[in-house]
Image (cartoon, grey):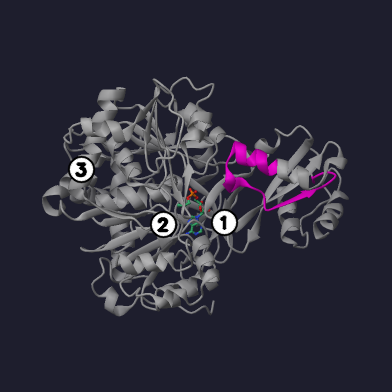
Amino acid sequence: MSEKIYYPNPDFAKDARINSMDQYHALMEEAKSDYEGFWKRYADEKINWYAPYSKVLDESDAPFYKWFTEGKLNVSNQCIDRHLKTRGDQTAILFEGDRGDVEHITYNNLSQRVNRLANLLKEKFGIKKGDRVVLYMPMIPEAAYAMLACARIGAIHSIVFGGFSAEALKDRIVDAEAKLVITADGAYRKGKPYLLKPVVDEALKEGVESVEAVLVVQRNQEEIHWEAGRDHNYNELIGNYSDECEAEMMDSEDPLFLLYTSGSTGKPKGVQHSTAGYILWAQMTMEWVFDLREGDVYWCTADIGWITGHTYIVYGPLAAGTTTVMFEGVVTYPDAGRAWQMVQDHKITQFYTAPTAIRLLHKMGEDEPKKYDLSRIRVLGTVGEPIDPPAWKWYYEVVGNGKASIVDTWWQTETGGHMISPLPGATPIKPGCATFPLPGIMAEVIEQDGTPTPVGEKGFLCITKPWPSMIRTIWGDPERFKKSYFGDCKKEGKPVYFSGDGAMIDEDGYITITGRTDDVINVSGHRIGTAEIESAIKKIDKIAVSAVVGKPHDIKGEGIFAYIVLKDPDHAGEEMIAEINSVLKKEIGAIALCDEVVFVPDVPKTRSGKIMRRILRSIAKGEAITQDTSTLEDPTIVPTIEGIVKG
Ligand code: WT7
């Protein structure tokens, strides 16, 4: 490959936490030669243990691995209390509202507010250790308080992204058997108030038995319905509770939270994370990958409804004792300069966003970043999908002014934290490539039997040794956990974690992610299962069959392309497309709307009736069909569909 290699800026590298590839290799060697010793060293150094653990890694019930067994700690203590002596007056959360309102919440403020809420949850609602609490919240500081208050009393939070529909919210509440829902009246977006609470009302209308109460934060004071006996006003109640609350002693392996994500069936998976392993890796990656230093102001633009918001807006930054920016609005409103204005105003040192946002900001204002003082930025991060080299170069040259390091971080809801990423002060970078596994992470590109995939060929991206922040199980479905992650690949005869992604390794050992190998598509960095979309579309009686695939999209990375077979072809047309999108909006949310819909007489199927999505993907992309179609039930359907798609 003749791609240019980008080396870390030497001025920056000299003071970086990990500042050379030699240091990286030494850490990796240490992990390889004494895996448990490596993790023990960090667990002892980083975690504020109430009681020591007895074993670093327990593999006796694989793949249900346990880390730091019998250790006692509390994540809210790790993120707040232990900082109070040294940084009580430092800003913990720097909040900027959609309309430009700014609030600095110090670690002392955070402690008081989290404790008050923890007491409220305990005393008013009887929430105890192990109870599930669903959060359906906008990007406001109360969302972080709620996460940390749950952690403090040992309740398990499950955040549902605010863009999900009432149906999707209900499914997740029911699956987790949540006792309480915390929400807000609404919030502000693009200068206007919007509502969230009505979605909760709709979700709880029928068929939800577990929920006893709803706690509502008033953010925009819009008119909402208050259900007597069920709904409670946070703003009115919170002042009645003490700002001291003893943190529950949690076991290392107690669940910290659930977060639902898409898989290859229609039912979302409740990914269950642990207490000790999760917070350890959240903190370590925060420090290494963003090269965190005293005085930094770090901004991640994700939403707390996704794993990025959990690990890299709330838990990682606070455990590491930095200042984390939380933003209610959208980075392109009121104009293409909003993000850069915020970077300048708040003196941001690390900026972390998704390729889709980078492409959009680039398109909206090629030279816009040059109008602002972005000189404090040392690290620019990206996550969610592969970043294409043109977007990478713009990010590097224009936003980072050729001085900041770019970290293309590969990881997943299930991994809890970064897995493959450059170290900003050490790794020479090939644009578009996530580079190397982080120290301690045994990521490999292999065949299903564990043999290494040859250089330059696509293989399975696996993590061949358990790591502390890994998914522990799928809530309520341990069999699905085993099958989804440990059913495809083995190394030395032992099942290993398969990510669902394909990857390629080059002659220098660089790993490039080639995308999902399953029927999961990635729209603007969000995972959506094609099966979820299809099972929603199935609710329309006039439709016989639907098959959904991802198609490359300029801004979103992938867009949703649907092939629809109607019972009566006369129903084809704009009205039908509108009906499909309205069902998707109702069942899943606006993120699942189709970019393109085509009506076809049939879809290619094997003789056993399996839809050949690979062919449909190729047709959607306008590629020539290279697959063998002779085994199809009706091979003539392929040119027919091609003709329809080409129009
Ligand atoms: C999937 C995980 C991790 C937080 C956001 C998404 C894709 C993620 C990268 C990257 C290429 C990436 C993968 C992965 N992905 N980061 N840097 N380069 N692909 O979390 O919803 O769990 O999705 O996102 O396909 O499997 P998620």
Helix, strand or loop at disc 2?
loop
Helix, strand or loop at disc 3?
helix
Q: Residue at x 46, y 39 (%)?
A: 160
Q: Nearer the viewer, residue 524 or 164?
A: 164
Q: Is residue 602 magenta?
A: yes
Give the side of residue 580 with respect to residue 462, left or right: right
In the image, farthest residue toward the left: 85
Mark 3 close to ligand 1, CB under 8 Å = no
The image quadrant where one finds the N terminus is: bottom right
Q: Read off the residue under disc 1.
A: 515
State how far apart marks 1 and 3 are (Cα): 41 Å
**Labelled pair 1, 2 in contact (Cβ < 8 Å):** no
Q: Read off the residue under disc 2.
A: 301
Give the side of residue 359 with respect to residue 442, left or right: right
Identify residue type, mark 2. Answer: Thr
Please state the extent of the stretch shown in magenta in the rendering: 580-604
Helix, strand or loop at disc 1?
strand
Q: Give the quarter of the image for residue 81.
A: top left
Sequence-first disc among 1 and 3: 3
Q: Give residue 314's position: percent from left, percent from top.
A: 32, 48
Q: Read off the residue under disc 3.
A: 111
Q: Nearer the viewer, mark 1 or mark 2?
A: 2
Identify residue type, mark 1. Answer: Gly
Query: Is residue 273 placed above or below 456 in the rendered structure?
Result: above
**Labelled pair 1, 3 in contact (Cβ < 8 Å):** no
Q: Nearer the viewer, residue 484 or 231?
A: 231
State how far apart marks 1 and 2 are (Cα): 23 Å
Q: Is residue 35 magenta?
A: no
Mark 1 close to ligand 1, CB under 8 Å = yes
